[in-house]
């Protein structure tokens, strides 16, 4: 809360957000109803958080925003970006046993801007972070506070093959919300209609894709599958974009490969901090930390979706992305 605001003005603003959310279109969601806020389906709590952020969030020019649609590689991107930006302070080789990534979840090291309930977790906690801040979001580009673009904060976006996003999201929500189990067929129907969390997924992709073309020096668009196929190449690209390129000596010493290894899915998954215990990252219920590390492979959708389902979703995505230059 802005210290210049009175309790009355804060309460009035909260009531206005509540009123606005109550007027939004509503539909069935994966585990609870979603509202349509400026073209995207989100929970009522997230809609209010986004409204609050648009009023109160104060970006900095050296902020780095890591963005993704849910279940598209967010955890991996957080780990990579944190390791790259902080490698002068936290060595990846040699004394890497003391590296923060080995004893902290990537989600604890890189907080979500929207939380997802900023009415419970004040925006002020983001103000307390030292620069340069690494921040994450699931918000579509058009829902980001306009001030982020105005000050020139850099944005890294990671996308993923939509069929794998669907399957990963289905597994994840069923694992953390066992009282609201959703069948795959129903999840497929909702996803194909654009009714997934922060969906439609194709519009989420397009927002960042188009901005990366318009501002390539400020917005980097990555694909999960390409990164998995050649992580060394993409980690170098990411380091350059973040303003911390590898030196020749680092490359010769194998520093890039060491970053890739430290941040690998299997290594992170097996760490006690990620494999046991619970987290309340979602803000609405505790969940097993291991739920963030299920599979991570490319093409897992083939183990779950029928060929008919795959063809239908491919056709929808191709049509939605037609003419954009983006394809999966």
Image (tube, grey):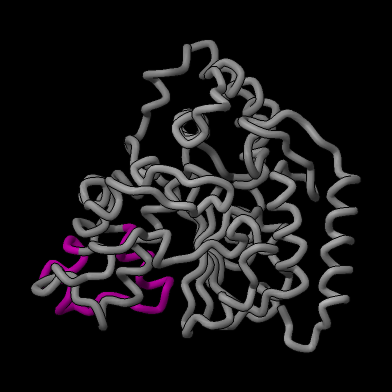
Nearer to the camera, 307 or 13: 13
The residue at 47%/12% (across/down) is 306
Magenta stretch in the rendered image: 234-258
Q: Which residue is most to the front?
A: 7
Q: Is residue 252 visible?
A: no
Q: Image height check: is 153 above or below 209?
A: below
State whether the magenta stretch is mostly helix, strand or loop. Answer: helix
- Residue 1 seen anywhere in this rendered image of the structure: yes
Q: How many marks?
A: 0
Q: Position of residue 41 (x, y in %)?
A: 72, 41
Between 298 and 21, the one lying in front of the other is 21
Q: Residue at x 22, y 52 (%)?
A: 271
Position of residue 311 measured from the top left corner of the image (x, y, whole percent): 54, 17
Asked if 279 appears above or below 299 in the picture, the reply is: below
Instruction: Look at the image and say whether residue 200 sits in the magenta stretch.
Output: no
* Closer to the camera in the image, 163 or 121: 121
Q: Position of residue 43 (x, y in %)?
A: 70, 44
Q: Residue at x 40, y 53 (%)?
A: 75
Q: Quadrant of residue 81?
A: bottom left
Q: Residue at x 35, y 78 (%)?
A: 244
Is residue 102 rendered to the left or right of residue 242?
left
Above or below, 264 against 151 in this view is above
């Amino acid at each position: 809360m802005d210290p210049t605001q009175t309790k009355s003005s804060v309460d009035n603003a909260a009531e206005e957000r509540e009123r606005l959310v109550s007027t939004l279109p509503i539909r069935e969601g994966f585990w609870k109803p979603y509202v349509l806020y400026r073209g995207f389906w989100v929970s009522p709590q997230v809609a209010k958080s986004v409204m609050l952020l648009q009023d109160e969030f104060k970006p900095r020019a050296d902020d780095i925003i890591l963005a993704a649609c849910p279940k598209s590689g967010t955890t991996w991107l957080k780990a990579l970006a944190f390791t790259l930006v902080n490698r002068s302070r936290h060595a990846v080789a040699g004394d890497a046993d003391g590296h923060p990534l080995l004893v902290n979840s990537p989600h604890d090291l890189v907080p979500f801007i929207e939380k997802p309930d900023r009415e419970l977790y004040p925006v002020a906690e983001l103000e307390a972070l030292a620069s340069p801040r690494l921040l994450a979001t699931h918000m579509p580009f058009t829902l980001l506070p306009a001030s982020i673009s105005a000050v020139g904060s850099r944005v890294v976006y990671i996308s993923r093959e939509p069929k794998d996003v669907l399957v990963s999201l289905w597994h994840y929500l069923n694992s953390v919300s066992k009282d609201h189990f959703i069948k795959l067929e129903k999840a497929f129907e909702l996803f194909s209609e654009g009714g997934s969390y922060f969906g439609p997924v194709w519009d989420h992709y397009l927002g960042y894709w188009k901005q990366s073309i318009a501002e390539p020096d400020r917005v980097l668009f990555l694909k999960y599958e390409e990164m998995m196929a050649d992580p060394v190449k993409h980690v170098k690209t990411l380091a350059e974009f973040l303003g911390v390129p590898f030196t020749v000596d680092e490359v010769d010493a194998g520093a890039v490969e060491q970053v890739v290894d430290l941040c690998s899915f299997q290594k992170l998954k097996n760490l006690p901090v990620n494999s046991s215990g619970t987290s309340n990252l979602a803000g609405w219920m505790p969940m097993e930390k291991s739920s963030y590390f299920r599979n991570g492979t490319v093409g897992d959708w083939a183990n779950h979706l029928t060929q008919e389902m795959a063809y239908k979703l491919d056709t929808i995505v191709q049509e939605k992305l037609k003419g954009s230059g983006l394809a999966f």
